[in-house]
Amino acid sequence: MHRQARVYVKTAFVQLLISVIVGALLLINAGLPLHPRLGLFLPVYYHLLMVGWATQLIGGVALWMFPVRSRERPRGDERLGWMAYGALNGGLLLRAVAEPAHAITPRSWSAWMLAVSAVLQVCGVWFLIIALWPRVRERPKVNRSSMGGG
Amino acid sequence: MPRISVFMIRTALIHLALGALIGGILLTDKGFHRWPWFWTWRAGHVHLMLLGWTVQFACGVAFWILPRLDAAGTRGALWLAWFCYGALNAGILLAALSAPVAGLVGRERIAWMSPVAAILFVAGIAAFIAHVWRRIRPWGAVPARGTSVGDYSGST
């Protein structure tokens, strides 16, 4: 497993841990009220789980296991994968702060933070797609007649 | 990678791109409240991300990497996987479009869309499970060339 895939998968598991802690607090809060504003973290919980964990884990494993592009550059331009990683996690982090903050007291700075978070997450996902797209392909057919003999 | 997996995984990536774009617009609108009509796409965002992206990607990879049925590399009934691909994506299209279209033509005229989408989801997933069920077995349990799965009684 190459370094980029390891970083993706380990970050995905950290996000899973954070999301289950948030989810546990939400669940406890439903039966045993801890704080009235805790419910504002529900969308953050969903996105940490589905984007931070599921999508990032899938991305990491796909970058590792999908068919290689060529012998010289097996994974294509790895910078795309790193840009996707930075944008996706930066966007999620920003969202985790800005979304509850904006729900409590809507302000101009929190609205702009949400917009920046949205742009980062969309760019992160699109970079990942661009990195993976050329590696989703059928096995090239070997032209046995052109291989010759001897 | 077999052709059906290429179709499923690439379509899943397209759903991910669309789902993320819709989600990004919704998140931005949480801050600025400029496009209230766009919230009709919220259910579409959920369907695209859960079924169109996650489930479809998993199906595509599963078809590719699960153990084959025999040493010749047979994967079993291919039409079940293609049926899943068609039904799943038709269902996602209907489920994602139902709320925005309802805003344009009225809820009564598109009342059929969600139930049809639901039937397509169930039929598609059932078809895929029917395909992969026999391929989920221990490593090394591939029968020798020339024998069928029914003849094989492998140890675990």
Image (cartoon, rainbow, N blue to C red):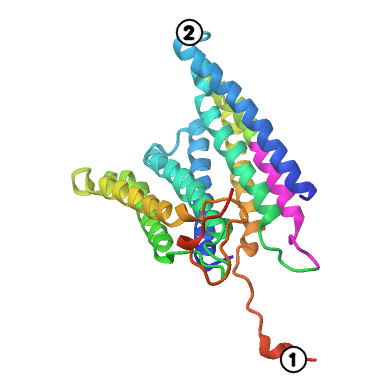
- Do callouts 1 and 2 mark residues in contact (Cβ within 8 Å)? no
Tell me: residue A9, above or below residue B127: above
Residue B138, magenta (yes or no): no
The N terminus of chain B, quarter of image: bottom right
Q: Main secondary structure of the magenta part?
A: helix
* N-terminal-most mark, 1 or 2: 2
Q: Which residues are magenta?
A: A72-91
Amino acid at pointer 2 = Leu
Disc 2 marks which residue? A32
Residue A78, magenta (yes or no): yes
Which mark is drawn over residue A148?
Answer: 1
The residue sitting at 35% across, 52% down in the picture is B91
Percent coordinates x, y for residue A82 in the rendering: 74, 48
Q: Quadrant of residue B107?
A: top left
The answer to whether any part of residue B38 appears in the image is no
Q: CA distance from mark 1 to mark 2?
A: 75 Å
Q: Is B142 displayed left or right of B84 in the figure?
A: right
Q: Quadrant of residue A107?
A: top right
